[in-house]
Amino acid sequence: IMHALEGLTEKQMQFKPDSSQWSIAEVVEHIGVYEELLYWDLLNNQYTEERPDLVEKVKGIDTIMLAYATDPNKGMAPFAAQPIGRFQTKQELLGFFNRFRNAVVELIQGTSADFRLHFVFRPPDWGVWHVRDLHQYTLVWIAHTERHLGQIERIKAHQGFPK
């Protein structure tokens, strides 16, 4: 993310290819909100009861989580993760993003919890996304960031992108 934003002006950060698409600033705000959500989910769920009984159930879905990075289906961000212009400058935006990205990295590096034995749960109709271990949950957010890096690169490559 930091490399993709290096040298961008405020005007470039705010550029939208059209009114139905997000700007780079909005993409980064969205990713930052998800970094905060990931942090709190990991922080809290690392203390849940270990569930070795679920290990076999989720075995093999790491590749599905990583495939999200290149999934051609466009998603719809939930209300809580939609960009609303929380930050006025690139510096404020990157401060928010880095606060939670760094906290996630620190948490993962410092925890003694086995992320393969702690789980997140979503509604049953979510299919393979219904039950995931914390390792898989982290993988999907890495893929989420990669997915949006592609979006940022497409915005930068748009013919109307400010020079």
Image: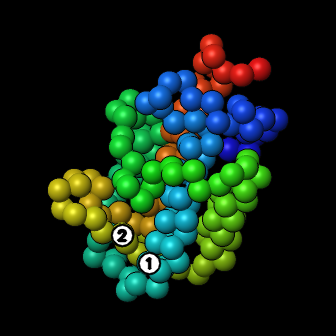
Q: Which residue is mark 2?
A: 120
Is residue 114 depicted above or below 136 in this figure? below
Q: Can residue 52 be seen here?
A: yes
Given residues 69 and 4, the one toward you in this image is: 4
Ranked by sequence position, the earlier of labels 1 and 2 is: 1
Horizontal side, residue 14 vs residue 9: left or right: left
**Disc 1 + disc 2, Cβ < 8 Å:** yes
Task: Classify mark 1: helix, strand or loop.
Answer: helix
The percent coordinates of residue 159 (x first, y second) are 62, 13
Q: Residue at x 45, y 51 (%)?
A: 82
For label 2, the crowd category at 10 Å Cα-Cα, with few meaning under 14, some 14 to 19 and many 20 or more, is: some
Given residues 39 and 62, the one toward you in this image is: 39
Is residue 44 depicted above or below 86 in this figure? below
Toward the right, the furthest residue is 7
Q: Amino acid at mark 1?
A: Asn
The percent coordinates of residue 100 (x first, y second) are 63, 65
Horizontal side, residue 133 vs residue 54: left or right: right
Q: Which residue is mark 1?
A: 45
Given residues 119 and 114, the one toward you in this image is: 119
Picture quadrant where residue 80 is located: bottom left
